[in-house]
Amino acid sequence: MRNCKRIKDVILATGNGSFFYDDQAAIRAGVAHDGFLYVGNPLTPGFDSIRMPSRSLSIGLVLSDDVIVWGDMMSVQYSGAGGRDPVFHVDAIEAVSRSVVIPRLLAADVSRFLSACEDVLAYHDNRRLPLAIEYGVSQALLSAAAHRSRTTLAEVICSEFSLPLPEKPVPIYAQSGDLREVNVDKMILKSVEVLPHGLINSREKFGASGETFRSFVKWVAKRTREIGKPGYRPVLHFDVYGWIGLEIGMQVEKIVEFITRVADDVPGYRLHIESPADFGSTEAQLDEYAKIVALLDERGTEARIVVDEHCNTLEDIRRFAEAKAAHLIQIKMPDVGSIADSARAVLTCKKNGVGAYVGGSCTETDLSARVAVNIAVATQADMMLAKPGMGVDEGISIVGNEQSRLLSTLGYRRNKVAIENLVAKSSVKNSDFNLR
């Protein structure tokens, strides 16, 4: 019995992420395009060019019955920005995996997910392992625990965190990339609950005094009415990459005034503004975002603030949630590290009355996206990202179908248990009757 708790061997496989790594600092500086490329030199350490193909490293755990379960290591599109880990390099991650992580895995007991994560992902030389490693290895450990217990990944999370089995779907949020108009139409035709992200990451897209952005917001709302199903009113969620602060000014009152005007442009819609300003550090972000949230709440608008930059780890998320420094926190899973911490982050947000958005990056893989669905559904997050990639259709399909399969599986098991309980009760009653 002891052997079934152990890992026989570990294998690695190089792979590709689903989009590109982009140097956010260089893009903010206003570099030009050459087709799909950016022209100029990178500014963020670790980048060889402003736009680089994303990579992944899969880690496979060979279990005692020779089944191999996998997890995928990678980092996010804007690596090295906003307090994040450096850009992902396969060779460096593989070296740490072989020297530090694999020996720990071969000694681990995979029967308990949380304790296995603690053992395998412990600090090395008084430092955390690269978060990409935490992310991918924890995926594999969750799959190992699910295989051993013959359950879904979500059921393992529910068991480990003492959560009820979920019954409700989590709203899906899709991102448009640069093909905004076409991809918005796709989202509307598929009745996506939250849209479109918009990728407002440059002065050109934001416009002088934000007028280009405001026009886009109004167009999205108008388009939902033109081609959406009757009564369709999605949440309008826009990531502005700090451009309200960069263009309008870093004063809280000015930022709030601008966001209020945008909300007034689209009456009847809930408006999410992600990353309205980048105040340069976690401490400054905490203080200033708390003021923005308080002022917006006083005004009673339909606008909600979403934090991303400088809110990366579980500890960051706890601090923002407790300080009410956002209405909604993006739990950007590769930046959080271990998926156990992503589950904890959702529960921390819920405990503090703050919205939990299980996010991630377009650079992820199909495997990491499906794992993320299980975390979001098990913890009943407020929304989750359709990922990976920037194609819209693929992310909606991968995330949406995984959620549908998962909820159907859980519903089947719930009904089966209910029937078994009824049969058991009936048998007891019949037994009592025979005794009489």
Image (cartoon, helix red, strand yellow):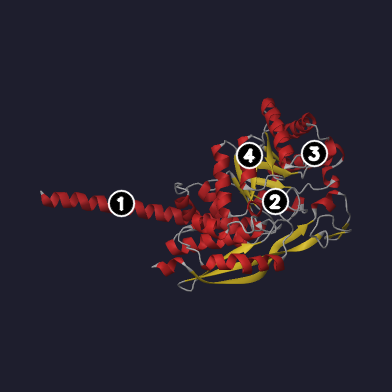
Instruction: Note whether 296 is above or below 9 in the view shown.
Output: above
Q: Nearer the viewer, residue 255 or 317?
A: 317
Q: CA distance from mark 2 to mark 4?
A: 27 Å
Is 307 placed left or right of 43 in the picture?
left
- The amino acid on which the numbered mark 1 sits, given as a three-letter code, is Asn
- The amino acid on which the numbered mark 4 sits, given as a three-letter code, is Arg
Q: Residues within 10 Å of mark 4 (few under 14, many from 20)?
A: some
Q: CA distance from mark 3 to mark 2?
A: 19 Å
Looking at the image, do the residues carrying marks 2 and 4 touch, with CB atoms under 8 Å apart? no
Q: Residues within 10 Å of mark 2 (few under 14, many from 20)?
A: many
Q: Earlier in the sequence, mark 3 or mark 1?
A: 3
Residue 114: where, in percent of width, then height?
50, 54
Is 279 placed left or right of 372 in the picture?
right
Labels 4, 3: front one? 4
Identify the residue under disc 1: 421
Identify the residue under disc 3: 244
- The amino acid on which the numbered mark 3 sits, given as a three-letter code, is Ile
Q: Earlier in the sequence, mark 2 or mark 4?
A: 2
Identify the residue under disc 4: 319
Q: Earlier in the sequence, mark 2 or mark 1?
A: 2
